[in-house]
Image: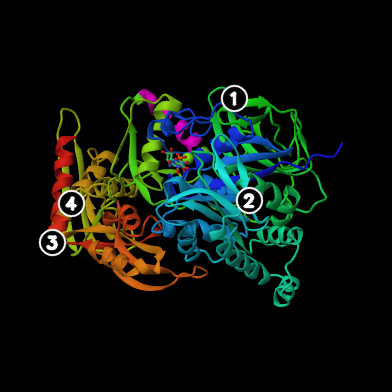
Amino acid sequence: MTKLAEPRCAVLVGPYLSGKTTLLESLLSITGTVNRKGTVKEGNTVGDSSLEARGRQMSTELTVAPATYLDDQWTFIDCPGSVEFFQDSQDALSIADIAVVVVEPETDRAIMLSPLLRFLDSRNIPHMIFINKVDTADASPSDVLAAYQAVSERPLVMRQVPIQDEDTIRGYVDLISDRAYNYKSGSASDLVEIPVELQEIEQSARTEMLETLADFDDDLLTQLIEDVVPPKEEIYQFLKKDIADDKVVPVLFGSAENDQGVRRLLKALRHDVPDPVATADRLGIEAKGEPLAWIFKTIHAPHLGKLSLARILRGAIKDNTALGSAHPSGMFRLTGEKHEKLGEAKLGEIAAMGRLEAAKTGDILTSSGKVPDGLESFPKPLSPMYSAAISTEKSSDEVKLTEALAKIREEDPSLSYEQNLDTHELVLWGQGEMHLQIASDRFKNKFNLSSVTMKKPQVPYSETISKPVSQHARFKRQTGGHGQFGDVHVDIKPLPRGSGFKFDNTVVGGHVPRQFIPAVENGVKEYLKSGPLGFPVVDLSVTLTDGQHHAVDSSEQAFKQAGRLAMSEGLPQCKPVLLEPICKVTISLPTEFTSKAQRVISGRRGQILGFDAKSGWKSWDEVSSLMPQAEMYDLIIELRSLSSGAGSYTFEFDHKQELTGRDADQVISARAEAKKAS
Ligand SMILES: Nc1nc2c(ncn2[C@@H]2O[C@H](COP(=O)(O)OP(=O)(O)OP(=O)(O)O)[C@@H](O)[C@H]2O)c(=O)[nH]1
Ligand SMILES: [Mg+2]
């Protein structure tokens, strides 16, 4: 009996709605993993099983499913296409043998593919393009190819030419085997003669393909120069090697909905995709050594608890064996939301390991717990671009929300959250409006938190003073028994931006007894939490210069109140000014949109610092600017809409800056109204 090859892993990626989930369904139905092919519209596909995905007819997280085709074992991973859900794609691609980039036969959507292709090429991940939906095609595969070539740094090579009746593609000629096929509904295509009118087109496409391959192989080049036609077997080998090295990208086409071209895709995968040993080598994992698995996704499943989805890239791992200090409890093979027990996960396989509580996506598991050096880095989580303040209406849900947040972040590292100390809001960060909406739905659907609400987060404004003042304040109360007495003189002065708050004391002669001085400082600090304009006061110094006390009536409380009073009387005379946070924003997008992005920056009160070609990215720019945080709330939405979804940005807090005029008045009056309402 011949030994079966190790299971290989193909990840389906590409722009949203290009048909990846439908293609997965077609692959699973052709290979017999499912008996009845589902459709996205009917909501019965293996992919998209979550309520969030079904409800919107779009993928919101990856789906894993195994298949066997002609004795070859496969794991297919269907990824969501929306840029807001790119995290799963990049993580799954990091452990894959091949990416199948599913695109639509449209020329104007090519630019959307650019960040994905950059990601693949920066890591030399082998990939092929599948032009889907050719049943609806307006543009011919060769026009589509030209559009995608414009955004791909690697040469694309057409593997097939279409056989067309008028506008309808009814089959294809395979350029290596030199055979023609007509699509046949429900089964493999029929072998037919190459139509006479196609022979010339096929020959020139074939020559073009061979010339591209010859760019990477001197032997082939010599043969072509000498007009020798290389044997098919040799061409297959050249192609296979160039794909494995991410030197060329083969392009196939078909229609996932109608199962057309999908068997051809399966055959291409069978012949051309590197095995897990080659992938491990590409990732820097030596062939010899203890078993090794790489976690690329974490799921909190309803009944199984935490599952770490890992690909075995060396050796084999048995259920219930220790992996360093971790000890998986239960190992499963997933088919969408279904699971079956797996006694042992072999090289190349994907195992869902149960209850590795401390493990996270990106972790490498070995029996000894040691991680080898020199491995390819796991991609960093996507940086945050959009935020919402979240809260629960029921206070009894607060603990549940904290737990759910931790889990949701484990499942999706491109989500993050922080408790903002200035605005006292819990802020959830993600990739866009849809990303956060889905997260919100997941709180309800998966974590039973029906009372979670999201709203636009507040900007953490603050205020400062622009003029020094000396202030005297006396706190005096006579209530029944002994009274309260505290008397202070303070100098209030502005400090340079970014200095924060400084408290000093120059009291002499014990006018304010030493033990009461910290109380004065506390009183001052308490007031500074909300200054005359309603915001935390920063960048000022307060010096206690003198005061008076009373032998019986003075107390910490009385001096605290005196400190507070000195501030509430003094600060309004110090010409308070509003400060707004300014961030350094770096926008990155294809060069053709750079001037539009510059207008967006100016329109959002930004100041352009400069722009440059993005290093390592052909035809992309980076524009750096300073922008008020108040203007950044929906920046990503505008950037994506002007750049066909390709643009993105990163930001970091830079400094606080005075805000005056009408903008400031609006902020101050909104704050006053909010205070009145609460
Ligand atoms: N005409 C036609 N429609 C298709 C084909 N493949 C998919 N579709 C339709 O395209 C739409 C999107 O299909 P999906 O499979 O959900 O696409 P997707 O790429 O998984 O979408 P996301 O994961 O949300 O990015 C659905 O309405 C499908 O029925 C095809 O080959 N031909
Ligand atoms: Mg999908």
How far apart are the two marked residues, 2 and 1, measured between alpha carbons? 29 Å
Q: Quadrant of ligand 1?
A: top left
Disc 1 vs disc 4: which is toward the camera?
1
How far apart are the two marked residues, 4 and 3, measured between alpha carbons? 10 Å
Tell whether 333 sits left or right of 666. Answer: right
Residue 491 sits in which quadrant?
bottom left
The residue that mark 4 highlights is 667
The residue that mark 3 highlights is 661
The residue that mark 1 highlights is 304
Q: Residue at x 36, y 68 (%)?
A: 592
Give the mark, 2 or 1, whose residue is nearer the N terminus: 2
Disc 2 vs disc 1: which is toward the camera?
2
**Quadrant into which the N terminus falls:** top right
* Labels 2 & 4 near each other (Cβ < 8 A): no
Q: Please report the bounds of the magenta region as a residue range.
A: 396-410
Check disc 2 and give the amino acid type.
Ile
* Labels 2 & 1 near each other (Cβ < 8 A): no
Whether residue 258 is visible, yes or no, is yes
* Label 4: which secondary element: helix
Residue 396 % position (x, y) = 37, 23
Disc 3 vs disc 1: which is toward the camera?
1
Give the mark, 3 or 2, whose residue is nearer the N terminus: 2
> Which of these two is toward me, 285 or 247?
247
Question: Would you place residue 109 above or below residue 324 in this image?
Answer: below
How far apart are the two marked residues, 3 and 1, measured between alpha carbons? 58 Å
The residue that mark 2 highlights is 98
Give the mark, 4 or 3, whose residue is nearer the N terminus: 3
How far apart are the two marked residues, 2 and 4, measured between alpha carbons? 52 Å
Check disc 1 and give the amino acid type.
Leu
